[in-house]
Image: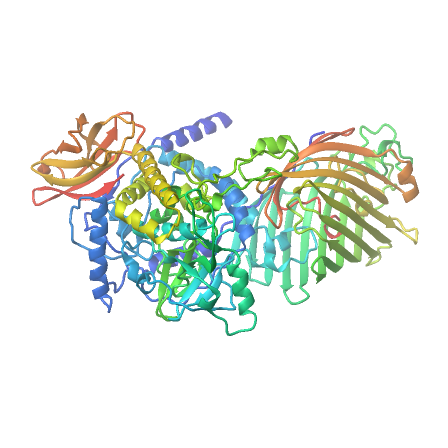
Amino acid sequence: MVRVAVTAPATLSYARVIGQLLAADDDPAVDGTLLDGRCARAVCMLTVGLASLALAAPARGDSGAVVAAGDPSSVQGIERAAVEPGDSGRETAATLLYLPRKAVDLLFRATGSVAAVMRDQQIVPRIAELLDPPPGDVSVSPTLTLGGSEPPLAGAQVIANAGATTTRLAVGFGGIHDLLGEGRIHFVHPGPVPLAFRLEGLADTRTGLAYLGVGQVPAQDPRNHFQHGAASHQADYWQQRSRLVSSLGARLAKDVQVHAAMTYVDSRVTDAPDDSRTIDRVFVSGTVPGAPGRSRILYGETALRLDTRPTAARPSGGVLMEAYAGEARGVGGDPTRFLRLGGRAAFFVPILRPTNVLSVAVILDGLAAPSGAAVPFTQLVGQPDYRGSDDRFDDVSYVVSVDYRWEFLPFLGARIFVDVAAVGPEAQELVDERPRAAVGFGLDIYTPSTTLGEVSFAGGADGVTAALRIGVPSRFGDRLHRY
Amino acid sequence: MQKPLSRTLAFAVLLVGCAAARPARFAGSPAVLQVADHAPIPLPQLRDPIATLALASAYVRRPVVEALDPRRAPDARDVNALDEVPHSSWFCPGCVEESGDEGEPPVLPFRILASPPDSGGDALAAVDARGRRFELRGDSPDRPGMRTAAAVIASRLAAAFGYRTAPAFAIDVGLTDFSLPNTGDDGRARAFLGAGPVTAGSPAGGAVTVEERYRIVAVRWPIGLDRGPTPSNDRRHDDPNDHVTHLHRRTLRALTAVFGWLGLGSLGPSVLRDTYVGAPGSGHLHHYLVDLGDALGAGAVVRPHPGGATVGDGANPWVTLGSFGLYTQPVRPTQQRWLSIGELDEHLSPADFSLAPPFAPADRALPADVYWAAKRMLAIPDGAIEAALDAGRMRDASARARLAEILRARRLRVAEWAFSGIVPCEPVRVDAGELVLRDEAASRGITTGASPAYDVDLLDDLGREVLPRARLTATGATLNVALPAAEALDYLVVRITGSGGQRRAFEAHLRRRDGGWTIAGVRH
C-alpha cells in the first residue's frame, strides 16, 4: 500500500501589500527636498556626489542637474521598464507557481503563535516563539490535503496574529459531500507562568473513510462479525462532525506544561449511497457500535508534559514524558461513557555530536468503559504515531519507536527508524499479539522551533507507506483532534 | 473536448512566453545624484529578530521559495539613469562628518556602561571622556591583533567605497584608562581586557606581552539611536523614507563583491545596522556597516579541530549524510605564520564567494551590480588602502605587507570577475554624430579573457532595428559608434554586446534634443 499525504498551506500578507501601496502613494521624501534648511547640506552632498561619481567616471547626458526623489522610478529616470526575452514566459510560470510558492512561505510563518492555531497539538509556546511573526500580520492562504484514505480537500485559511491572540479560519472543499469549516482562537498570556487558552470549533463532512474492524488482525479477530460473502473486509463510511474544544495550558516551568481541556463532539456516521462496502454490508448489522448512528460526547482531559529538549524540531538530546487521563460521557441521551488513559516516554541521546540523536519512544494509549457501555467505533484508540498504516483500532495500543536522526546540513536532518505497534482489547493481550513493524528512513526540514516538512518511506508487512508532509506534522496530534 | 482545450492553453502559454522584448525607455530627465531620504520620521521600532528563526529563513525558506519563482531578479532600483547609486542614507562617499564626530578617536578614559552593546555580541559598551558611545572589542588570545586590525582596516576601506561605516580605532589601553565608578566595573574591565594583551610582533608573529597595556578596537556606536539589524529582504515598514525593497538595493547587492574583497564571509546581526539620527520625531534613519571584526578572514579562522567537522566548517554534507553524522572530516587549519591575518589569501574566486548566513540581496546581485562595485573598488586609491592599513596599527610589518598584497590581489580578482560578466563600457560624450564610449576593462588594464570585439545594435525605443548589426572593434580603450541622423528618430538605443553573447549588454539610451543626440540613460 502506498499512502501519500500532503498538506500545503500558503500565505499572502495583505497588511504588507497594503503597506507598500500606501508607502508608494505617500512619498514624503519627494516633497520639500532641498527646500528646507538642508540646502547648504544638499549643495555639499551634490559636490561630494559629483566627486564620487567622477571616481567611476561615467559620462552624463545632463551633468549638473539634480532631482532629489524617493520614488524608485523617478530615481531611475525610467518611464517604461524593459522587457527581456522570456520575461512573459517567466511571469506566466510564476503565476502558475504562485500557490506552492506562497504555501512554502506560510510554512515558515507556521512558527510561534501561528503554529499554535495550526498545530493539532496542545502547546504553550516558549516566549521566544511568540515574537515571530510580528503582531499585525494577516495571512490568507490556500490549503490542500491529499491522503490515501481520505478524499482530497482544497480550501483556504485566514490567520490573523495580533500578538497575544491568534485566530484561524479555514474552509475546505473536496466535493459536495466533503466540506470543512474550522475556526480557532488562541490566546497567550506571557507572564511568569505563561498561559495559553484556546477555543476551537469545527464542522465537517467526510466521505470514503475506511474501517477494518478492531484488533491487530481485524480479518481474524472474532469480535468482528463480517457478513458472509462480504466482498471485502474493509468498510467505507461517511462521517459528519461538529466539534468544540476549549483548553487551558500553563508552562509551570521551563520544560513542564500542564493542560486541561474539554471537548464536545457530535458525530453522525452514515453509509455511502450505492456503496457495496458500507459498514452494514461488510459487518453484520448492529455489531459495530455507532455505525450507522449519532454520538454526542463530552470529553474532559488533563495532561502533564515534561520535555527537556531545547527544541522538538532539530535533533537534540533530552527527555520527553507525558501522561494524560480523561473521561468521556455521552450527552443528550447518548449512553456512551468511557475513560482514556495513556502517556508516552521518550529518551533522546546524543551520539558523538549534539545533532546525532538516538531516541527510543514508547507510546501507550488505553480506553476503558467501566459501565460496559458500547463505545462508538470512531472513538476507539488508533495509532497515529505508527509510521506504517494507521488503520488498526482497539481499546489498548502501544507503539515503540527507535529513531536515529542526524543533521547533515543546517536545518536539514535525516532519520532511520523502526516502529513496532500492536492493538488489543486488553493490556495483557497486547503482549501476546504479534506486533506490526515498519522500518524506514526519512528527511526532515525544520526551523529551530518547528518541523516544516518531512518525507519518509516505511516498509512493513502491510506494504510500503510513503508520506510527504509539508507543514506542521499531523501525526503528533493529541487526543483532542483525533476524533 | 480535453484536447482542444489543452492545445489552446499550450498555445496561449507559448504566445505569452514569446512576447516581444523591448528596451527600457528613459525619461531623459537629469540624473538623480542624491535621494533625499532624510525627511523627519517618527522613531522606528527597535528590530530584534530571533537569530535562529532568521537563520532558518535564510537557509531554508528563501531557497525553496525562490526555486519556485522563475522570474529574473530585476535591475537594481536604487540607481539613477546613469546606472550609478545616488547619495542617500545608504551610500554616502565622503560623509565622514556624518559617521560620528568627524571620525575622531575616543578620548580616554572610558566609563563602562552596564547595558550590553547595542549592536549585540560580546563587546563592552563604554562612553569616552567626551561622552561619546563606543563598543570595545578585543582579540582572540591565539590571534593577537587580528580581529582588532580587521575591524579598523575593513571599516576604513568600506568607508572609502562609499558605505556609511561606524568609525573604528585600534588603541592600547590599560586598567587606568577606565573610570570604574560602579561596583563590579573593575571585574568587568579586567575580564574584558584579559582577552587581549598587547603584543609586540616578531616577523614570525611571535608574541611578547606588553605589560599592563591591552590592544582593543573601539567602534563608535551607536551613532544616534540603534534601531536593530537592517532587514535583508523587505523595506522597513516603519521608515516612510524607505522606498526600495532591500532585495533590489544595489548597495546591498554589491556587498557580495565588497565583502568578497574584504574577506568577510559571516554576516551576523551586528554588521548591518540601522540608526536613527536626530531628535525623536524629527530624525531619520541611516544604514551603517558596524562590526567588521570578522573581515580579512578573521571570522573564518579554522583552528585545529581535534574532533574534525560534520556540519559546517567546510564539511561535505553528503559524507555527513552517508556516514550517519558519525564521521568527522579533517579540516585544514588557518596559516600560523601571520597570526594577525585570518583565513585570507589572494586566491579568491568571487563567483564562489558567499555570505553566511545567505544574504538575499547579495544573492540577487546582477552583473551590473558587481560591475558597479568593482568600479568603486578600483577607484579607491592605493594610498587609501595604505592609510587603512596604517590605521589598523599592525605591529608585524611583514603581516602588514602581506595583507596589502592580498587586498590588492583580491580587488583585482573581483574586478576581473565583474568585468567579465558585462560589456564594461561607459559613455564619454556624444558629438559629431557619434557616441564615444570607453572600454573600462581596457582603460584600467583589467584582463577578462573575453574578446575585445563588440557588436553594436541600433534600436528604436520599441526594440526595432534601426540599422543592421555592426562589428565594433576598440581602438585602445575608446569605442566610436556612428549615430544616425537625429531627425529621423526621437529615441535611440545603442546596444553593445560582447562577441560571445554571454556577457550582459551595455545600453546607452539617447534622446533627440536640439537637433542632436543627448544621453538619457545607461544600462549595464
B28 left or right of A221?
Answer: left
Q: Quadrant of residue A92?
A: top left
On the question of residue A28 being in view, the answer is no
- Say above or below: B322 vs B142: above
A135 left or right of A116?
Answer: left
Task: State the image coordinates of residue B97 (x, y, percent, origin top left).
Answer: 29, 62
Residue A175 vs residue A308, the one in the foreground: A308
Residue B27 vs residue B209, the one in the foreground: B209
- Say above or below: B328 vs A16: above
- Say above or below: A132 vs B300: below
A234 left or right of B400?
Answer: right
Give the residue drawn at x 64%, y 67%: A191
Q: Quadrant of residue B379?
A: top left
Q: Quadrant of the N terminus of chain A?
A: top right
In the displayed image of the protein, which residue is found farthest to the bottom?
B181
Q: How many marks do you count on the picture?
A: 0
Residue B450 vs residue B161, the one in the foreground: B161
Task: State the image coordinates of residue B94 (x, y, percent, origin top left).
Answer: 27, 56
Residue A296 vs residue B126, the one in the foreground: B126
Give the residue drawn at x 36%, y 45%: B397
Task: State the image coordinates of residue A278 (x, y, percent, origin top left).
Answer: 78, 36
Give the residue drawn at x 64%, y 60%: A186
Q: By what rule are the colours in the image chosen?
A: rainbow
On the question of residue A283 being in view, the answer is yes
Task: State the image coordinates of residue A355 (x, y, percent, origin top left).
Answer: 65, 42
